[in-house]
Image (tube, rainbow, N blue to C red):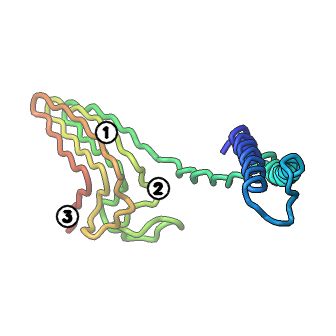
Amino acid sequence: MTRAVRWLVVALATAATFGVCVWVVRAVPWGWLPQGEGPRLDTALTFGAVTAAAVLAAGGWWASRELTQPTPTPAPTPAPQRVRKQQATASGKAQVTLVGGSRDLAPSTGPQPPGTPPAGAPTADAPARVDQDAEASDDSSVLLVGGHLGPTSDASADGIPTEVEQRAKASGEGRIVIAGGDQHAEGP
């Protein structure tokens, strides 16, 4: 409620209090009130003014104070969305593989550097959105994988983007293979 509306409520309540008090004192025949019309009206007006002043004081305090609004907590800032955009053009006998998520084509046989994920496991830095565009012509081949490319069939969903957009164009004897989610390579 705005401050102006609160003051309007206070003014109306004060006027109503004054009017009701004057009417009650004049209308009710209490024996202890003055009997004459003039003295009874003076008593009613005095009682109404004192009561209205009390209502005005309480209402003035209410109308003039600042209402504290609860401070809305800001929405948490979303984590930056990783977007991976890939483009490829293949011609002749070229072979192109675009992997939007994570890639592990063969199990590791030797020691790995620290921080390297296990064979077949998707990497933690997989993007949230993948945008791939490829062209193949002559005898070339293009493989587009939007998610995880690896030898395991139980790869975690951590390496799979939430949004994949893929476009491809082939001419001549060009070949394009598109996988929107996971492409599991068969190992020996």
Q: Disc 1 on helix, strand or loop?
A: strand
Q: Which label was assigned to residue 186?
A: 3
Identify the amino acid type marked 2.
Answer: Asp
- Which residue carries the number 2 mark? 125
| Picture coordinates of residue 87, whole percent (x, y) | 33, 34
State which quadrant residue 158 falls in.
bottom left
Foreground residue, 25 or 98? 25
- Which residue carries the number 1 mark? 132
Identify the amino acid type marked 1.
Answer: Gln
Q: In this picture, is 96 found above or below 74?
A: above
Identify the amino acid type marked 3.
Answer: Glu
Q: CA distance from mark 2 to mark 3?
A: 24 Å
Q: Residue at x 16, y 32 (%)?
A: 170
Q: Is residue 161 visible?
A: yes
Precedes in sequence: disc 1 or disc 2: 2
* Dot 1 and dot 2 residues touching (CB under 8 Å): no
Precedes in sequence: disc 3 or disc 1: 1
Q: CA distance from mark 1 to mark 2?
A: 17 Å
- The quarter of the image holding the C terminus is bottom left
Foreground residue, 147 or 69? 69
- The answer to whether 5 appears left or right of 154 in the picture is right
Q: Disc 3 on helix, strand or loop?
A: loop
| Picture coordinates of residue 62, whole percent (x, y) | 78, 52
Foreground residue, 110 or 122? 122
Q: Residue at x 33, y 68 (%)?
A: 107
